[in-house]
Amino acid sequence: MAKGFYVSRVCGICGILLAIAAVAVIIALSVVYSQEKERNDQLLNTPGTTSGTTTSATGTSSSTTSTPSHEPWDNYRLPKSLVPDHYDIRLQPILTKNSIGLYVFYGKSEVFFTCVEETNLVIIHSNKLNFTTPTTAVLKDSEWNDLPVTIVEIKPVTNYLVLHAVNKLEVGKHYSVYTEYVGELADDLAGFYRSEYVEDGETKIIATTQMQAPDARKAFPCFDEPAMKATFSITILHKPDYVALSNMNAIENRTLIQEGEEWTETVFAKTKKMSTYLVAFIVSQFKPVGDPGNGTTTGVQIWGRKKAIEDEQQGAYALSITKPILDFFEEYYQTPYPLPKSDQVAIPDFSAGAMENWGLVTYRETALLYDPAVSSIGNKERVVTVVAHELAHQWFGNLVTIKWWNDLWLNEGFASYVEYLGADKAEPTWNIKDLIVLYDLHRVMAIDALASSHPLTTKEEEVNTPSEISELFDSIAYSKGASVIRMLSVILSEEVFVKGLAAYLKHFEYSNTVYSDLWTHLQAAVDSNVPPLGLPQSVSTIMDRWVLQMGFPVVTIDTATGSITQKHFLLDPESVVTRPSEFNYIWIVPISYSKNNSPGNYWLQTSTEINDAFRTGENEWLLANINVTGYYRVNYDEGNWNKLIAQLGSDHLVIPVINRAQIVDDAFNLARAQHVTTERALETTRFLSGDNEYMPWQAALNSLSYFMQMFDRSEVFGPMKEYLKRQVTPVFEHFKTLSSNFTNRPGPLTDQYSEINAITTACSYGNSDCIEYATNLFNQWRTSNVNGIHPNLRSTVYCTAISEGGEAEWDFLWDKFATSDNAQESDKLRAGLACSREPWILNRFLDYSLDTDKIRRQDAITTISNICNNVIGQSLAWDFVRGKWRTIFTSFGGSSFSFGNLIERVTRRFSSEFELQQLLQFEIDNADVGFGTGTRALQQAKEKTIANMKWVNDNKGSVLKWFEDALITKSI
Ligand SMILES: *[C@@H]1O[C@H](CO)[C@@H](O)[C@H](O)[C@H]1NC(C)=O
Ligand SMILES: *[C@@H]1O[C@H](CO)[C@@H](O)[C@H](O)[C@H]1NC(C)=O
Ligand SMILES: *[C@@H]1O[C@H](CO)[C@@H](O)[C@H](O)[C@H]1NC(C)=O
Ligand SMILES: [Zn+2]
């Protein structure tokens, strides 16, 4: 699956409007907790629907784990006695309501399996299927004779269908279970589900699937574990004006009449041997663009709503990149694409970002469709990275699959790394590979630096229930996994890495692995090709330190003495690590460094070492972790920090762009952890006035967003605002000239992002040119009624104009919002509306947020959150939430995603005793209503407020003084 939280990438860019704290707050300790939670919740729950999804999909699973299991069907893991070979599945979704108002599907399914251990029990997964077979399920031998069965029973907790055979099944013999059943085609985004959209005034229904992780059992009875690979023959019945898609190509169409109605039966080719979680089928009226393939060439098509695909050509961009990315991965993996076709389908309601079903990849619309007229460059980047991620899985994940979910990190970490390589192939001018440092490495380090983090690996026996499986889909798995695999590929060299990888894929094709199998094949590649750097230890010895231990080290280099040390980095210096490590939190760290630009490499294997290489001369600086290929932070002695900062001030281009971002990000995090002073961190922002690059600026904006939250209502804000305005103005001017007064967009991706950041920052910190420019553009739109604002700049322009304007501007934008039918544009409009500085307008907007005729239910909480970001809106939103707690709780209490998030957003600025008291009072006042799934967020809000009070108390004076002094000293 692709990350559900890709959205925040795009918002990270457009974040910090008008003294509004950025969405991508990386540094604030507790914010990090909540991001993590938000992410988990996004995967579990669906902001887009009204029902709490996984709860219904997975039943009452976790509460029962502690009960001792006596019977085989009490175990969440299947017994090893039976191994599936093949499934024949025939499904008929009915896309109209039945007499009791439900949407259902009918299924007939036969699973063929081999007995490998004598047993009289057939235990197979099934969830929420109502069997209509005369005897629920029929057991047969390989000659199709029915075998006698005493009891057939359903075990709802562990999701099993259990058949007790009279006679023991014999080892080596083949059997099958046949069932007929009805299931609900619910809008729960799990298993076989329903999605709706409106086209030409008509509601259209589609039936689609999301099986990962354990929901194939909601569509057909199956051995629903990734290692239980089998082949599948799928047949779908649908109305003639619909089209059916599945993993494989259709091989046959038949027309048949059922109760006087005409149906089409589409038969798909038998699949390769594959896992149940990768099975997919869709019935829709979607339209394709692309090449369906002809048996010798691989078919590549993009599917979606007719209006999006045919009228607006929104599939054109995805089509243009999909084939090149597939070709790239064929070459990279040295393995041909194993299937005859690859369909990419945009689904109107989708829980994750995308799903790598083999041959039939499904996406959220925003992750596949792109409309140059309204989509920004960030929207485009998302399409190319998500497509690359899912296509990477077609081999790594689908052809070769993890044995069990505990190794999910390998599957997702790997895809999250190589997605950058695939995207780079499709957009070679973007330098997109650099961005992994911002999007994955820096982001996840903020979480992995908490004492409550966890290692990449989990033991197989610790992962059993559906909710335990869901918990694994977190940013440690994706982003730390990606960062650590990237580090390994650099250590080994890309050439050796790819060689070992290809051998691994060849060896395990159509079967399953554990993560150490990859190390084995990489080691073999190392042994036959000495990597350029030489390895101090085996691949597995090095990697064990990174995958079995949580967290990462801070490496401290003293350039006066040449000492180099490592220590487990903890963001909160007072936190206590209770999780033991067999390696005592010592890593084997590859140190690449540059001494006044001459490169070197070193392996740090113990806690403290001394080496002359790290001693520098009087005019030499030393920079470590070049391009941040290593997963660690770096601290230096005072002297070296001063020299690096001086170098940045005199000629920042000498330091690679990724390392300029690193210096800022490391310094702010080191300050937070009290390894360096806050002033030292602020010093690293001085060079930014001369740096037009995106990455260093984005690192600083992420870091400073916490300062904004803490100080935007205090006397610190005046000088802080002046300072940032002064820093950004030269960059703003640079882009203004470069783009002929912002009429053209710069070419490279990061330049476009940097331009957006420059305008956003300049306008929000009061650059009058910027504000004039933005309000002019907005007014041209109002007068001409033609929106000539480039999609990249819309978020900023809307927010600035609304902030500067009054009722007329707001009402104009509201009207555009109310009539918009493009989701990406609606989001930009809705965020802009939250930027007003008029309390009455904001209060009215808060009221609108709970009115489903005005704002879709799925957007209610993000609307309130947007208002919270606005310094004026935040206290209004707090009053609103307190005043309407009962209503809000009743409407949204069931959806943990929105709920925890709301409490986090509305209390984010809290940093005083008075606010803490309000929070405590709120808890008392609403004890009778309760906080539901927001309970944890409320506890965190209290802790966070206390932590903020301490931080503000410790830092306010020095930060104020620093900004005041910075304004006196000349800009560098
Ligand atoms: C199935 O029928 C449709 C519509 O008649 C046709 O376009 C398609 O090619 C057919 N597919 C196969 C595999 O026969
Ligand atoms: C660091 O990254 C830059 C930009 O991606 C690249 O041009 C440069 O070659 C890299 N340096 C090293 C030492 O790999
Ligand atoms: C940009 O605008 C300024 C006035 O604000 C004008 O003097 C200048 O000629 C314009 N440049 C271009 C390239 O349009
Ligand atoms: Zn994935």
Image (cartoon, rainbow, N blue to C red):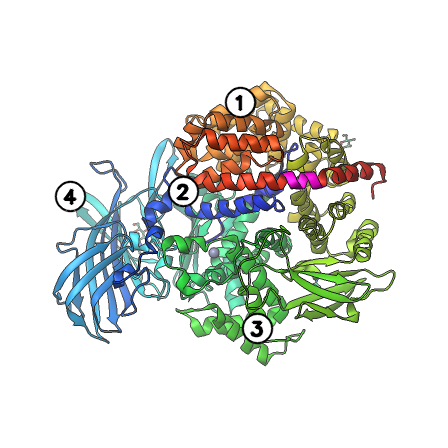
Mark 1: few/some/many CA within 10 Å (<14, 14-19, 20+): some
Is 787 in front, or is 298?
787
Tell me which amino acid carries mark 3.
Answer: Thr
* Image spot of residue 519 (x, y percent): 52, 72
Marks 2 and 3 close (CB-CB < 8 Å) = no
Mark 4: few/some/many CA within 10 Å (<14, 14-19, 20+): few
Give the quadrant of residue 689.
top right
Is 149 in front, or is 199?
149
Is disc 2's CB within 8 Å of ligand 4? no
Q: How many marks?
A: 4
The magenta stretch spans which residues? 949-954
Q: Main secondary structure of the magenta part?
A: helix
Residue underneath mark 2: 349
- Cα distance in 3D space between marks 1 and 2: 30 Å
Residue underneath mark 1: 843
Labels 4, 3: front one: 3
Quarter holding the C terminus?
top right
Tell me which amino acid carries mark 1.
Answer: Asn
Q: Specify which label sits upstream in the sequence, 1 or 2.
A: 2
Q: Secondary structure at mark 2?
A: loop
Residue underneath mark 4: 259
Q: Is residue 955 left or right of residue 7?
A: right
Quarter holding the N terminus?
bottom left
Q: Specify which label sits upstream in the sequence, 4 or 3.
A: 4
Is 586 in front, or is 317?
586
Residue underneath mark 3: 541
* Image spot of residue 776 (x, y percent): 67, 26
- Cα distance in 3D space between marks 4 and 2: 32 Å
* Image spot of residue 119 (x, y percent): 21, 70
Is disc 1's CB within 8 Å of ligand 3? no
Q: Residue furthest bottom?
A: 528
Tell me which amino acid carries mark 4.
Answer: Glu
